[in-house]
Amino acid sequence: MGTRRVVSVLLAALAMAACGEQQQPEGLAGPSLAGKPLNPAACDPNSLNSQITAYFPGNTSTAIKTLKDQLIAAGPNTTNGLAAGYSILQEIGNLSRNQAVDRAAGSTLAQGIIKCTFTATNFPAFPDSSIYNFAPALNADSGGAFYVRGGTNADTPVQGAVGIHTETPNILSGVKPLTGTWETALSGSAGGKALVYGYRISGYPFNTDPFVYEWATIPPATQFAGGALVALCDGVDPSTAMVHETNIGVLAYQGVGAICNTDSTDYSLTIKDTGWGPRALAARLARVVVDALQPQPLEATALLKSGTGGTATTFKSKFQKKTVETVAISFNPDPPATLYQKKMPYAVQVFVSSSVSDAANGVNGVCVYLTGANNNGVNTALGGNHECENEAPGAVSAITRSILVNGQPKAGFADFQLSVTKTGALTITASSKDATGKTGVIGRDDQQFISDVARTNVKP
């Protein structure tokens, strides 16, 4: 439904009232790693000098050791300690994008710096989990991404690209604030910054999809105020394609031109900037095709680069493009058999899903409309949410988004506060059809929707 416009609630960050066992909007907690959080090894300042010299060549290690001294003197989770720690992590990433590096040494150093920068006892399974193996993210020439964002980076995307040490790097995936700047997006993170890193996973899960990208953050599950746009840049954006995030579901669709296609002047300036030290990290113009990760002529693709994007407020997940064709709408659960006007409004929830990987995968970014009718088919006006345009008379609408289910974010839920002024039998239909007859995911076309019907009785 590429022409449908909705109210700004789709783009807003979702606030959380409480965690507990209740289902809550997406916001504070991202996907958790399995297992009980483990206490990491304590900060070991004596090991950091050797770790620094193992990764940074020659005299370039001197400046990093100075930052390390500042970090140790300030201590973890302090203003100066966080600033020094993030600066070292940024230089670890900068070096990887300018020359071949010892990725294992870089991963060990990053872990050591993280131990001394944060009180990391709440980092799930740090440093033993594979998500904290930073070597793939430091393989910048093969699609790895390792960037510190926040502060004065404006809205420059974080990107993973193949061939970044050549003149024709190919962007695989990227992340940028959905609205505003990184400074705003990361204002709630420790020190106002975060390490955003990722890498391409080949053949996940059974060599059926050649293009899967994993993104994560330090601190884990960093919240992006206003949301983040995650892009998969494969050069195509068919009308049924959406981004699927493991453990959560299908993300709300967004266009990704700002990540996958950049002005050629910016590209040239970035390539000319060859120093390994601190620098402005501009977006790189490139292209990638799904079935062949080979550099393509820049001139042939400068205006054609495209991809598929989705919105998230946190992530620590694998992202891949999936075809979303048939979408089912169902009450979750059915409204009560009897509705009493004196108790209105009633909380009514609708779940929207698609058989992407499994039938339980919810789909975000869908306008769900509820309409009412009596036994004779005469329309009955409903009261409640009005989040989408083009509502039929007497209808209510809400947009599907993620909520917490058993402590884990899950996509595809539309929550209504429903009221009815007319007593008697009531049939409630949940569909994605607006007053003009259009159906579909917001920003997408060609999905087939299966609606649901619930019957109840309204009493005074």
Image: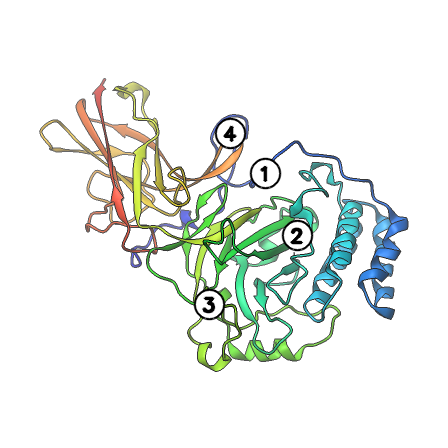
Q: Of residues 263 and 240, which is closer to you in this image? A: 240
Q: Kindly identify the residue that appears in the image at 80 percent across and 40 percent down.
A: 41
- Among the two numbered marks 4 and 3 on one chain, the one whose residue lies closer to the N terminus: 3
Kindly check if marks 4 and 2 are in contact, taking CB atoms under 8 A apart as contact.
no
Kindly check if marks 4 and 1 are in contact, taking CB atoms under 8 A apart as contact.
no
Say which mark, if any, is on residue 194.
2
- Among the two numbered marks 2 and 1 on one chain, the one whose residue lies closer to the N terminus: 1
- What residue sits right under mark 4 in the picture? 406
Q: Residues within 10 Å of mark 2 (few under 14, many from 20)?
A: many
Q: Tell whether 282 sits left or right of 242.
A: right
- Among the two numbered marks 4 and 1 on one chain, the one whose residue lies closer to the N terminus: 1
Going by the numbered disc 3, the residue's amino acid type is: Val
- Closest to the camera, between mark 2 and mark 3, is 3
Element at badge 2? strand
- Among the two numbered marks 4 and 2 on one chain, the one whose residue lies closer to the N terminus: 2
Going by the numbered disc 2, the residue's amino acid type is: Ala
**Residue 419 x %, y %:** 28, 28
Say which mark, if any, is on residue 397.
none
Mark pair 2, 1: CA separation: 17 Å
What sort of colour scheme is used for the picture?
A: rainbow
Q: Residues within 10 Å of mark 1 (few under 14, many from 20)?
A: many
Kindly check if marks 1 and 3 are in contact, taking CB atoms under 8 A apart as contact.
no
- What residue sits right under mark 3 in the picture? 289
**Residue 269 x %, y %:** 61, 79
Element at badge 3? loop
Element at badge 1? loop
